[in-house]
Structures are given as structure tokens and as C-alpha cells.
Image (tube, rainbow, N blue to C red):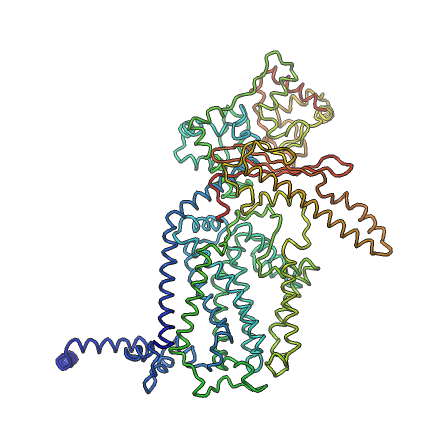
Amino acid sequence: MGVINNVTQEIRKEGLFQWMLRQLDVLITRLTTGMNWNDLRALARGDEPRRPNPRLTVHSESFWFHIKPSYYHQSVTKIGHTFRLGLLSTYFFILETITGIFLMIFYAPTPERAYGDMITIMTNVPFGQFVRDIHRLGAEGMVIVVFLHMVRTYLTGSYKKPRQFTWLTGVVLLLATLLMSFSGYLLPWDQLAYWAVTIGTSMADKAPLVGTQAKLLLLGAPSIGAGGLLRFYLLHVLFVPLAIIFVFFIHYYKVVRVGISLPSSQEEVGQDTAKRVPADKRRYYLPDIFTDEMVFLGLVTFILLALIIFGIYPGAPLEHHANPNKTPLHTEAPWYFLWIQGLLKLGDPTIMGVIVPTLVFGFLAIIPYIDFNPSRKAKDRPVAIALWMLSMSLLVVLTWMGTPYFMVESPPAEEVVQIMLPEEKAGPVRQTDWDKLTLGEWDTRNDNSAASFETQKLMVLFADLIHEEHMKVVERHEEKVAKLEKVRNPTPAQQEDLANLLATDPGLPNGYGKLIIENWQDSLKKVTARVFWTPEGSTEQTFEKTFYIHDQADYDNR
Amino acid sequence: MNNTMIKITTGIVTMLLMAGIFVLFVARDEPNRLPAKEADFSARAVENGAMIFEANCVGCHGVQGKGIPGVAPALNSPEFFTTRLQEVGYVGSQRTFIESTVNAGRPVGSGQYSAVMATWGQQYGGPLRPDQVSDVASFILNWEATAVGGEGQAAQPTPTPIPSDASPVELGQALYTSKGCAGCHGEPGGAGIVGPSMTGIASRAGSTVPGQSAEEYIHESIVNPNAYLVPECPTGPCAAGLMPQTFGTLLSPAELDGLVQYLMTLE
């Protein structure tokens, strides 16, 4: 009864309205762990805080704010110093978690259901495709941002004493990010997923000593199947995220503990004054940095969503159902692993696919421990900067070498048909209006004026492609001949090679193509693409492939 | 207004506007996008199904599902879509009828058709994954519009007419096509598909089973396929019971004779 009496007396004294306002203020102070309404207002207005500073109370009392330092050196808060790439990596991790949980609701990791669930997400879940696109773009964005974060740290020399261990945990986080992307790659269970991961896990197989065991552990079977899918799923949603959270907190603790390194121009060589911030150089987290970060992340979210909604980002693809019996003409690793695929083309898979990448990441990890140069100034680090430039160029070249444009010689006729009517994606024939695919047998040598303009255009393209692919082979031959002519004493094997060039790889001499378009079913046309060529002294050769095209299928829109 | 105020206001306004506008943007399109996307994927299922049908089913069910008389029924006929379920006493949907038949085969033979419906589904030991079975069903169901809608009436299977004054060899050649021999044994002169190729059968037949002439051997192989099994079929050792046992009763003696004589020309 005493409590109620007290309250009644208070209300009598202050009036009900004033009393309620005061209670509200108490509530606000509790919620903000230390700031009342006037403090919040002052914060928003940019006024000086009262003394004792309630904004510091927030940092000492609130869990989330205690993680953040209460002030930074003003030199490290400029966007051009860190580009806020660490914050951005964390943001992407949270974005991926939220969108990932949304997707998990509609997805079961079994070969029988996975692909069907993907279709359901795209066709029957409101916002399903939208969220999937964000998840995919976020994953690619996270790889880029984590990579750039490391590049920035390297270029400003921020990995040097006392931040060596921060860098080391950063390398672990980079690896975890890549593993995160890679394990997620398999989950849609389409051709893209299946074959990209097949390449990846076949590399694990090549690891010395433990290779076979490692692959078995990863897949639960000699090849990708139900076991592999479940294991990749668990890696993706449980194991790797937990590892990332674990290492992230070590990483971030180190960042706060030793402070963000100042621009090298502001310090003597060997000095580290990040934690000794003079009072006039402080920028407080509340409100300045906090609002900076929120505006920054708001803008990033804006850009991400705009990329998706205006179709600038082509969206997460979904190819045909995974089919172990059908290898695509070109299998390509995800772009951030193309450099490994490029390496693989250069030599022994054990060396190029396992040992070299291990050395690369191992070297990355120990950089701070083998770089004895105390200076962080670029002009004092010619070797380090040159090494960086060299590795970036190598990365670009190797990435290019990983694409099918390098050292992949597929039969030219197959290549022509693959361009006209790719196994996946649209291609010119499917992009043509379905009604405008005129029924009949069309020949690139003939005048096809009976066909629709669109079909005629296809036939012109068909003829051009056959010519182009033939010329590629001719150029290839000329290169080989030129190379062999430089050899002073060609071995018999080399001479035989030269003599057999035309026999083994004739290109498409006297090539022409036919497109046979038949009405097959309601809204379904059968399209047969045939390529003919006649090598010298031989009979006519042919390659053909049949496709069915449905009026309603819309490969353009993924 | 000082700097902080401007930043806070811009930040909050940008974020709220952005979130609102973008979600509205997507929400506005969702009611149209979802069905369009569904039609897209249904269409892709038909395309996939067509590929699978072409590769596995035309041997018995004929090109475009026209059926081969005496071998396997047409799948593009009005009857298939209107009365078949009642005839066999099936109470499920047309789709589940097709899917279960493709998956599990036909446990009970039908006197009308000689070919055996194999178990195509992976869970029954066949080659097709569940999604592929579903795609084949989508393709077959896509005939319904033309079959029942009237346009497709012409697509009814019509047996190749055999002229009454045809020679036995001509009769045999027509039977080879119309009874669906080519479905398993391949076109004359070509490779076999499931059963052994008939190319050069006339030269081999005489020496296959000791004591049997070429004609006797061919005749027996048609009416009683299990009497002698050649060791090599395109898909492995030839299995007993794979070839229908009913040709002896399906074909008249004159027809049998014609078929044997025709095969004897394949040297």
C-alpha cells in the first residue's frame, strides 16, 4: 500500500500529465541505457552533451554500444581512409543472415526436393525471387568487400605491429567468406551448382595424402549426391557462419583494442599513436560516427536494391536440374575462383589446384610476420607495393585464363550450336519471338525470304557464326605452323602433328547450316540445328542438336 | 540546422523512403510476376519432357506420341485424355496416372499391345529421376489441348496401309515398322536400341544355333524369343522376357512368313 500512496502523492504534487511525462523519460533513459529525452534531443541537434556525459554511459551500459569505441581519432573517420569496408563486411554478413533465414524457410536440402524448392521460391513465394537476388548479390558483394578490405589494409601497411594478429584473423575470415560462397553455390542443385562444385571438390581429391579422405568427408560419397548436399548445407547455414562469428569477434576485439591505424603521414615511422587521441582530435561515436555509419549503410542498401530492381544486376540464375550424366560444354567456376581454374589449366592439378592456392593463402597469413620493414609509408615500401601490383596483375590474368576464352578448344560445330541455342540461358533463337520462328527447313546457303524477317536474321547470324568459328580454327593452325617453323630441328612427332593438323582439326570448310523448325505440340516447337562441313578429300560431315522451345518459356528473364 | 542534423535527417529519410519505395515497387509486381514465372517454369518442364520423351519413349509410343498399333498406345489421342482412366479403373488424376505408369511401369500386361512398359523411375530401378518423370508427364499432358480441343483429331494413329497385292518381303518390311520392331532393334541397317541390331541378320542367322537354318532360327526368335538369347545387346547381355512373347499369336502365319522373308534380305 505504501508504494501506491507514494505514487498518489507524487501525482497530486506534479499533476498527472507531468508525472506521466516524467515516467516516459525514465523509460527512455532505460531503453537508451543512460540518455533521457533532452539528451536524445541534444544528440540529434548536435549540441554539446551535458556533464557527466550521458553518451559515454551508453557505451559502458549497452551491450551493442560497448563493442564500439566511444570515440575515434578524427583522421581515421574520413571515408577515404578505411572506406568503412570492415563495417560493410559485417553489414553483408547480417544481410546474408536475414535473407538466408527467409530462404531456409522454403528449402529442404535433399536432391529430390532442393531444385523443386528453388522453383517454388521463384514462382510461389511472394518476394521469393527478390530475396534470393539480394542473397546472391550480397554474397558476391561480401567477397568483393572482404577482398577490398584486405587490399586497403595491405596498402596502408596497417597489418604491421601491433596489428599482425588482426590481419591473420582477417585472412581466416576471407577464407571463411569464400567457403561460405562456395558452399552456398551447390544448394540450388542446378547444373551450374553441380558442375562448379564438382570441379571444386575434385580439387580436394588431388590434395596430397589426405585428398581422398578430405573429399569423402566433404561429400559423404565418392561423388556429389544426397550426402554432399546435406553436408554443404550444414557448412553453409551452421558451421561456417558460427566460425565466422567466432573469428569475427576476435578480429573486432583486436581492432578496437589497438585502434584503427592513423594515416601513415601523421606518425613517425615505427610509432603507433592510434590509442592516444588528443582531446581536440576526438570524434565521438554518438552522434557523429553512428549517423555516418547509418547513412553509409542506408546508401549501400539503396544501391543494392536499385541494382536488383532496375535489373542492372542480372539476378541469381537457375539452370536445369543437376544432371550427373550431362556435362555442360563449358563448366566455369564462380568468378572469384576463376583464378584457380586458370591455374589448373597450366599444369598438374595437385600442384596448381591445391599446393599453389595453399601457398598463396599461407603467404597472405604470414605477411605481417615476415615483413620487417617498420614503415607504413608507401614510398618506403617499394618491394611490398611492387609485389602487390604483380599479384593483382597475376590475379587478373589468371582469372581471364580461367574463362572458356583461354585454352579451351571445343569442336567448332558444337560451339556454333551452343551460341545459337545454348544449353542454359536464352541465346538468339530463344530470344526470337516464338511466333516469328517460321516453320520449315531453312538453309544458310539459300534465300530464305519465305521466312519471317526474324528467322532470316537468325539464318544470317548462323552463317556468320559458322564462318567465324572456321576462321578461329584457321588462325589456330596458322599460329601452330608459325610456332613449328621457328623450331630449327622439328622432331618427327612435331612434323607429324603439323601434317595432321587439317586431318584432326579441319574447322568448318565449305560450312553451312540448317535450322529445321517444326510444330510439335500446343505452344511447342521443335528446332533442329544442323551444321555441315566438308573437309578436303573427305565426305560431308554433320553435327546436329535438337531443342524444344515453348511459347511461355522466358529464359531472358532468368 | 547544423551538420549533424542534416546528416541524421538525410540518413533517416533516405532509408525510410528507400525501404518503402523499393518494397512497394516489388510488391506491385509480385501478383503478376508469380504466375508469369510459374508459366515460365511449367513451359520449361514441357521442353525438358520433350527431350526425355524423344530420347526414351518414341521407340514404342511413336513420334509425337502417335502410338504404334500393336506395340504401345497413342498418348496424344482424345481417348487417352477422356476415357482411359475409367477404362483401367484408376481414381487418381491424369498426371498421377502418367507419372505412376512411367515410374513403376505396367504391372499387368494388356492383350492389345505387345511392348512391355518398363519401370522408368529411379526408385523402381529405372534411369529417370523424379523431376524427369514429372517433366515427361508435363510434356504428355500438353497434348491435351490439341487432343481434346478438336484440332488434334487428325493425329489419331493410322496403321500404314499395306497393299493387298504386296509381296511377302514388302509385307514384312511394312510389319517391321508398324509392329514397332524398329523401336528396339533399330532401323534396318542401323544400330540396335535395346535389342540387337537386325543389320546382317540373314548372314548370321544360319550359324547361330547349330542344326537350325536361318529361316527356322528367325521364325523361332519371333514367336519364342527366349528359346535362344544372343549374348550381346546394346545395353548389356540380352535379358530373357525383354522381347514380347506374343508375336506368335498377334501375327498371322502369312505375316510371320513375310517378316521372316524380309529379315532374310538384310544381309
Would residue B104 be seen by someone viewing this image from the given angle? Answer: no
| Vertical position of residue B195 compared to residue A402: above or below | above
Q: What percent of the width, then of the height, locates residue A4?
A: 15, 78
Image: A536 above or below A187: above
Q: Quick one: quadrant of the N terminus of chain A?
A: bottom left
Residue sitting at x 36%, y 68%: B12
A391 or B194: which is nearer to us? Answer: A391
Name which quarter of the figure residue A346 lies in: bottom right
Count every numbered label the image shows and give the total. Answer: 0
Q: Where is residue A552 in the image (x, y as percent from the top left)?
A: 46, 41
Nearest to the observer: residue A30 or residue A237: A30
* Percent coordinates x, y for residue B262 in the rendering: 66, 20
The residue at 61%/52% (across/down) is A331
- B15 to the left or right of A195: left
Quadrant in the rendering for residue A159 = bottom right
Q: Give x and y (percent) for residue B186.
A: 63, 30
Q: Residue B183, located in which quarter of the rendered image?
A: top right
Residue A138 as seen in the image, left or right of residue B26: right
List the single residue furthest toward the top.
Answer: B165
Query: Looking at the image, which is closer to me, A195 or B97?
Result: A195
Whether residue A203 is visible, yes or no, is yes
User: In front here: A408 or A396?
Assistant: A396
